[in-house]
Image (spheres, rainbow, N blue to C red):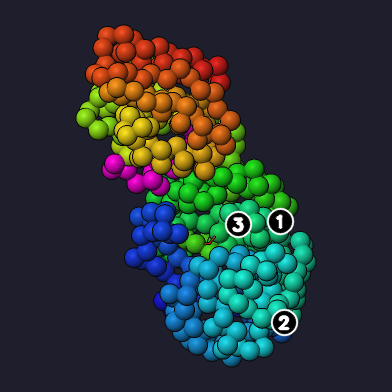
Amino acid sequence: MTAREIKSGINWVGAIDWDRRMFDELIPLPNGTTYNAYLVKGSDKTALIDTVDSTKESELMNSLKQLGINKIDYVIANHAEQDHSGTIPVILDTYPDAKVVTNEKCKKFLIDLLLLPEDKFIVVKDNDEISLGDKRLKFIITPWVHWPETMVTYLVEDKILFSCDFLGSHLATSSLYAVEGENLLESAKRYYAEIMMPFKVSIKKNLEKISQLNIEMIAPSHGPIYKNPEFIINAYKEWVDDKVKNEVVIPYVSMHGTTERMINYFIDILVGKGITVKPFNLTKTDIGELAMALVDAATVIIGTPMVLSGAHPQAVYAAYLANALRPKTKFVSIIGSYGWGGKFIDQLKGMLGNLKVELLEPVVVKGYPRKDDFKALERLADEILKKHKALQL
Ligand code: FEO
């Protein structure tokens, strides 16, 4: 990909990864991603803001060559994760006078992860600035988006916030600028759900922190650039807010159709009560879809049969994931079935310690569900409706 000018003296020099389908060998990326790096030329100095994943090193280096860059003074490292820092060693080899500008914590990570020499760093603190001549870069420490060392860089004169992971989206697109709509919102929400949601308290503080800035453009390190910052800031404000929606998310698995029969019956009752239901058959679902559904839902119901001596491993995985992602869910319950014994309620309950949830009476049946079991499902649905109404959903 060639360099693209954003404003006079400011160029996108990143890379588009059209084919990447997995991040951290865990997170599905149905729409690929981008690694955005930005070159800012001031009247005296030149800064490169973040780099790219090392697999895309040649694209960054070609862009710099195309722009005729023979000197870089500063490499700003907003975040130490390798998809943004991975090409720093090559930049330092190519531009030996360049210094890495970052905060103390990020410096330590970069030394550990990339074996960079200590004398290559300039350490900055919250609100510090460096001058490029006619342009100033201001650094704002925004920890835990999703690592502890993260910061963002504000280009004061041009009012551009280089936010790195924060406010980004996993979306490979040839459009440099955000095209607002469902596709972009879904990519940004998926990204938030998969990596940011566990840190929503910190994200909220960081949103407040950047609200002090006069931002005309947000240039993240994944996905397109926002010329309308409010689009993504307002979406984040909604996601981190404590308010939940009148929704029930049902991750479930069924071995011989018994649990599925109960889940299907339960879905019909909930829908009849005007509750939005999002079922996920765990043998088929993309966990990113499940993560996105967890962002807003008031209630989560895990459906599982007994297998071996506990919950089905797919249900265990869903419980583990929900616990790790720490959604704002208020109510949880379990629907399941068994043949001759087992204790999966305590097992699953014990796995949800991070969630501040009320456990509603589970419905677990021996064998195929009978009339009383369907009645128990109806009672659970009534209880959910009552709880949601009490929250004015
Ligand atoms: Fe895009 Fe946390 O790296």
Q: Secondary structure at mark 3?
A: loop
Magenta residue span: 283-297
Q: Which residue is mark 2?
A: 119
Q: Residue at x 38, y 32 (%)?
A: 310
Report how far apart the C-alphas of labels 3 and 1 lie in the structure: 22 Å
| For the residues bearing labels 2 and 3, Cβ distance under 8 angstroms | no
Q: Which residue is mark 3?
A: 147
Report how far apart the C-alphas of labels 2 and 1 lie in the structure: 32 Å
Residue 341 shown left or right of residue 212 in the figure: left
Q: Which is closer to the viewer, label 3 or label 1?
A: 3
Q: Which residue is mark 1?
A: 213
Q: Residue at x 36, y 20 (%)?
A: 364
Q: Position of residue 115 (x, y in %)?
A: 60, 77
Q: Residue at x 63, y 53 (%)?
A: 144
* Among numbered discs 2 and 1, the one appearing first in the sequence: 2
In the depicted structure, whether residue 223 falls above or below residue 197: below
